[in-house]
Amino acid sequence: MTALRTVTVDGSPVHVLEGGTGPAVLMLHGSGPGTTGSGAWAPTAQALGASWRVVAPDQAGFGRTPVPTGLRGGLRLWTEQAAALMDALGIEHYAVVGHSMGGAVALALAAARPQQVTGVVAVSTMGTPGAPLSADLDALWAAPAGPLGARDMLSRLLFDQALVTDSAVEARATAMRAGEAAFASLFPPPRARWVDDLTLSAQTLAAVRAPVLLVHGAEDRVTPLGTAARPLLEHLADVRLHVFGRCGHVPAIEHPQEFRELLSCFLRRPARGPVPG
């Protein structure tokens, strides 16, 4: 069973979906308006809960986690807050699963905390050196709260347009309206600078010693396979790439069963020593 609660991290509240027993898995959501930890990961967390302890926070500026006073959202804050959350929960070793923006945070966290992070799954990830701001990511960050913005955003995220149902649009529109004020401060135009903020240097990527699984959709328009995932194969020491055909930006929604099996298989892999530096 998973449950929602608030954890105080460095004096600031962080809203968390948590549950399950076993080795810990930190799950970090992406950057779309209306995105939350539970919205992005609840079905996956429920499926993993029998074997793993899942922690899926709302990152600062999303859902019910505010940006701490005097700070602004960005890679440094999200990475430091994720590390501090796991410290606050008393979790010493953990795998990290991150989607899109959360993938960049997961990789940055693995570089910063090599003794704690046991593995990384970066799904439809950002963070790749030289990756441009795609037109679809620009539009996604600019999507207005409400049904029209929600429908346009979902149509860009998903390859299978049959999944853009009225109920999915209504749920996303409600979430977008709830987080509208906080989100407005995160990615204002010109937006290419926020892609730059989430970009990891070659030096940072080389510092990732944990095994990394990259998961990507072949038809991802938001973070295209060729510019987002493939170049990381040359930067990471211990990496493998799984590509879903007929899949857009959200494999966990378009191929849920296969995605969970892939995730479980990677998380269950036998522990190995660190990659030589």
Image (cartoon, grey):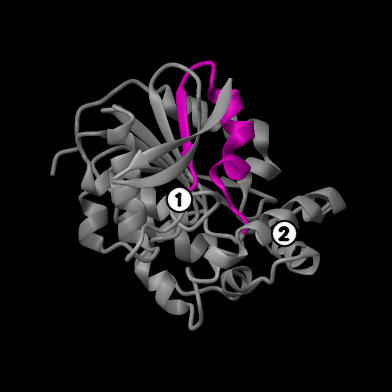
Residue with the mark numbered 1:
59
Residue 36 located left or right of residue 168: left
Distance of label 2 from label 1 (alpha carbons): 21 Å
Residue 14 located left or right of residue 202: right
Residue with the mark numbered 2:
154
Residue 119 drawn above or below residue 98? above
For the point 64% across and 32% down, the residue is 43
Residue 261: tell me if it is visible.
Answer: no
For the point 70% across and 64% down, the residue is 153
Kind of residue indicated by mark 2: Leu
Residue 251 drawn above or below residue 257? below
Q: Position of residue 129 (x, y in %)?
A: 34, 67
- The total of numbered circles placed on residues is 2
Under tag 2, what secondary structure?
helix
Q: Badge 2: few (under 14), some or many (20 or more) residues near its Cα, within 10 Å? A: many
Residue in front for this viewpoint, 186 or 141: 186
Under tag 1, what secondary structure?
loop
The residue sitting at the left extreme is 277
Give the extent of the magenta segment: 34-58
Residue 34 drawn above or below residue 47? below
Residue 167: tell me if it is visible.
Answer: yes
The residue sitting at the right extreme is 166
Residue in front for this viewpoint, 112 or 35: 35
Of callouts 2 and 1, the N-terminal one? 1
Does the magenta segment cover residue 172? no
Q: Position of residue 55 (x, y in %)?
A: 45, 33
Q: Quadrant of residue 110?
A: top left
